[in-house]
Amino acid sequence: MDTPEARLAWDALAQCAAEPNPFHESWYLLPALRALDPQGSVRLLRVECAGDLTGLIPLRHENRYYGRPIPQLCNWIHGNAFLGAPLIAAGMERAFWRALLEWADANAGRGLFLHLAALPLDGPAHVALEAVLAEQHRLSGLVYHEERAMLHSSLSPETYFEAAMSGKKRKELRRQFARLSELGEVRFERRRDDHRLARWIDDFLVLEHSGWKGLAGSALASHQATARLFREALSGAASLGKLERLTLSLDDEPIAMLINFLTPPGAYSYKTAFDERFSRYSPGVLIQRENLDLLDDPAVGWCDSCAAADHPMIDHIWRERRPIGRISIAIGGKLRRSLFGQVLRRELGRKPTGL
C-alpha cells in the first residue's frame, strides 16, 4: 500500500468516504504501521469494485480480549488512534460489510469472533452494518457503549461559549486571562500551513512531556515510536491541508498547544498540551475557547473531541455528544458461532457495558 499509485487511490477513498476517519488515512495509518507494528502483524483489508478502492480497514488476530485469554479477529486500534471506523466510499457501505464478513468467515484463524472497537454509532456505516447483520441472521452484540464530547452547532463561537459556560465561569476565565497578560505578551496563533512545522512539533513534544504525561511515561516523547508517528503524521496532514495548529504563547514561548485534523465535513481534535506551571491561569481552557472558531468554518460541520467519556474539562465546553461503541460479531462455522454465542451471553449478562 505504500506506493504512489496505492496512496493516490487511498487518498481518493478518504475524500469520498461515507464517514471520515483520519486515523485510517494514508498519512496517518502508514506511519503508525511503521512505528508501532514493525513485525507486520496488522493486515490491511482492501475492498475494490470495478477496479476502484471502495473500502479499507486494518485488522489483526489478537490472543487476548480485554485481559482475558479469548482469541479474536479485530480492527487495529492503538493508543494514539481514537476511532476505528473503516474508510468506506459513500454508497458502498453494505457491500463493504458483506465483503468484510465473507473474508472474516474464511480467515477466522483461531479467532472466536470479529470484534470492532471504537466505532461511531451515529452514522451510515453503522446503519449499514446493522442491516447486513440482520439480512444474514448473524449473531452480534454491542458490548460497550460510551458518549464523548463533540462540537456540533449552528451557533457562533461567542454565542456557543455563552450558552456552554455560566457567567461566573466566563468572568473567572476573563480574570485569569488578565492576570496572565500581566506576566508578558499573550498571543494566540492559528495556522493551517507547514510554516516552521518541525519546530512547532518539537515544542509540542517538549511541552507535553514536561507535564503529568511525561511523569507517567505516556507522553508522545516518552517513546521513540510514538514520537516518530507524531512527526510523520503531522507532516503528512500538513502536506494535504488537513492540519490545524493552535498556539497560546507568553512572550513567544508556547504555554498551550492544540492540534485539529481537518476531514470535511468533520474534524478531529487530536492532541492538546499545556504548561502546568501556568495551571492557575487555565491555559488549556483558554486555547479551547479559541478552538470554538471551528464553528465559523463552513467546511467543518462538527468536530470529534477524541476525548475520553466524561472528560473533566472538554465536557463542560463542548455540549454535544458522539456515541462510540464496540461490536462483536459471529464468524466462521456453526461450532465457532455457538461458542461465540456463549461468550456473548455471558459478557452481556454479567456487565452490559462490556467486560
Image: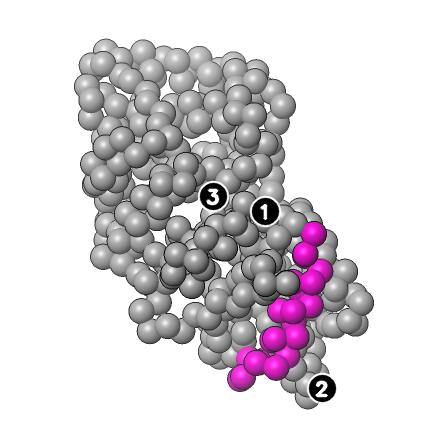
Q: Which mark is residue 25?
A: none
Would residue 166 be seen by someone viewing this image from the given angle?
A: no
Q: Would you say residue 103 sits in the magenta stretch?
A: yes
User: Residue tagged by mark 3?
Assistant: 307
Q: Nearer the viewer, residue 240 or 163?
A: 240
Q: Nearer the viewer, mark 1 or mark 3?
A: 1
Residue at point 42%, 22% (across, down): 290
Lower position in the chain sequence, tag 3 or tag 2:
3
Q: Nearer the viewer, residue 183 or 193?
A: 193
Q: Which mark is residue 334?
A: 2
User: Residue tagged by mark 1?
Assistant: 16
The colour scheme used here is one colour
Amino acid beneath label 3: Ala
In the rendered image, the quadrant that contains the C terminus is: bottom right
| Label 3 environment density (alpha carbons within 10 Å; few <14, some 14–19, many ≥20) | many
Amino acid beneath label 2: Lys
Q: CA distance from mark 3 to mark 2?
A: 39 Å
- Relative to 205, say whether 140 is above or below: below
Q: Which secondary structure is most common in the magenta stretch?
A: helix
Q: Nearer the viewer, mark 3 or mark 2?
A: 2
Disc 2 secondary structure class: helix
Would residue 296 be seen by someone viewing this image from the given angle?
A: yes
Lower position in the chain sequence, tag 1 or tag 3:
1
Q: Would you say residue 73 sits in the magenta stretch?
A: no
Q: Position of residue 92 (x, y in %)?
A: 68, 56
Q: Nearer the viewer, residue 184 or 82?
A: 82
Q: Nearer the viewer, residue 118 or 31?
A: 31
Outermost residue toward the bottom in this view: 335
Residue at point 37%, 72% (across, down): 40
Q: CA distance from mark 2 to mark 1?
A: 37 Å
Q: Nearer the viewer, mark 2 or mark 1?
A: 1
